[in-house]
Image (spheres, rainbow, N blue to C red):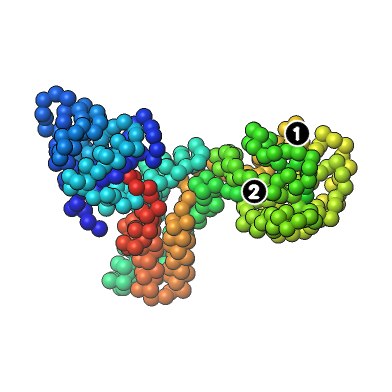
Amino acid sequence: MRLNDTIAAIATPVGTGGIGITRVSGPGSEEIGSLLFRPEKNACRFKTHRLYHGDIVSPQTNTVLDEVLITLMREPHSYTGEDVLEINCHGGPVILQAILNEVIKAGARLAEPGEFTKRAFLNNRLDLSQAEAVADMITAGTDRGLRLAVAQLKGNLSEKIRDIRSAVVDILAILETSIDFPEDDTGISLAHELAGRIQSIIGDGMELLSTYHQGKIYRDGASAVITGKTNVGKSSLLNRLLGEKRAIVTHIPGTTRDFIEETINIKGAPVRFTDTAGIRDAGNSIEKAGIELVWEKISTADAVIIVLDGSEKLTWEDHEIIKRNRCGNCLLIINKSDLPHILNVTELYDLLPGVKPLWISARYGEGISALKERIYSSISGNTDNNRSEIMITNLRHRIALERTVSLLSSAGENILKDISPEFVSLDLRESLESLGEIVGETINEDVLDRIFSNFCIGK
């Protein structure tokens, strides 16, 4: 990657706003600022980290593009570790594009997605896990997801990974001393000591891995499909969960033909609910196609909420829905608790052993709080690390950590089997490489490109 050139991009979201920012990074930042900026008062040489008021002017036509505030942050005390120029202008897209065009004419090139953060990583301003946290902060859907991303940006995860790496390095140093000076080897006692220390490190790794499922939910969210036969109250339930009238509710069967999707925050986890067409013997090809899509949606959901009508007996549609979800992560909800209870609950225990039905009234809100608790327990796997500020939220991190644990397990077993220390040392070195992948100490350019390509331009 070229680090001797200057890049530029619009750093604020697309659209009209009160303020827009054009960001420039690289050795030509100050020169570009001097060329385009006309200060309100006398000409001045930029001082670092100071705002200046004036105009951005096109050098070719001497046309004023906008009245701005501009600041230069000299290396290394900037986001990228390079000279960074930020032009704060009015947030009209035409203004921003005109300024960006002039910046590029002055010698910058358009930045690639995530290139500012990539330069911050390459210039040792951030490690790789911290750089990934920047993207997670931008896309966080809940306060809890944001807190986890901020903690990762502040280095909580990096510190934990480096502690694990340091412990492995200590063991490796002892082991390689025994290779260099075999006459000093104390034999069985040393093997058991090292195996015990390795096992302790494995425990730390497994504890971190145990947070992945919940951490992923906080980061990426979870999906829950609401299903059931027609007129059991699926749309009413969605409206009640959202706290607003989002889905049309009528007594006419088949009102819902297409998916309605909305996301709400349940204990810090963004849960995307999908209201689906009622399952029944379809009367036409359109409704039949809609029902087939329901089954497809259910097959990929993190949780399936099966809604039954408590004011009537189970029907063949109810039996079919329950039958096709026996192997899935499902919740049984009996709606219309405000009406006489006719449904035989005992029959449900036989149909779905181990799944406890919950009575609710979507119309009046009875049982909705308990339902949210069950949904959270269902998607989180009945674990609650809600107070932890160190979680694995990224699949790349999980894979690297799993490989680390596997290599350490192999090393510990081989030590106790009195396998040659050279082979044990190889496992330990490879485990260090896997840990290094998380913070970016051992990573290749292709992986870096793939990571930063998911960032927005301007970050």
Check disc 2 and report its element: helix, strand or loop.
Answer: loop
Residue 65 to residue 174: above or below: above
Q: Which residue is mark 2?
A: 259
Residue at 31% over, 48% down: 117
Q: Label 2 sits on what residue type?
A: Phe
| Residue count near mark 2 (Cα–Cα under 10 Å), binned few <14, some 14–19, many ≥20 | some
Q: Label for residue 15? A: none
* Residue 377 horizontal side relative to residue 312, left or right: left
Q: Nearer the viewer, residue 147 or 8?
A: 8
Q: Residue furthest bottom?
A: 420
Residue 323 picture location, percent across and down: 77, 59
Residue 55 to residue 354: above or below: above
* Residue 2 horizontal side relative to residue 195, left or right: left
Dot placed on the residue nearer the N-terminal end, 1 or 2? 2
Residue 15 picture location, percent across and down: 40, 38
| Residue count near mark 1 (Cα–Cα under 10 Å), binned few <14, some 14–19, many ≥20 | some
- For residue 92, say whether it is visible: yes
Q: Residue furthest front?
A: 61
Residue at 75% over, 31% down: 364
* Residue 75 horizontal side relative to residue 351, left or right: left
Q: Residue furthest top?
A: 41
**Nearer the camera: disc 1 or disc 2:** 2
Q: Label 1 sits on what residue type?
A: Arg
Q: Which residue is mark 1?
A: 363
Q: CA distance from mark 1 to mark 2?
A: 21 Å
- Quarter holding the N terminus is bottom left
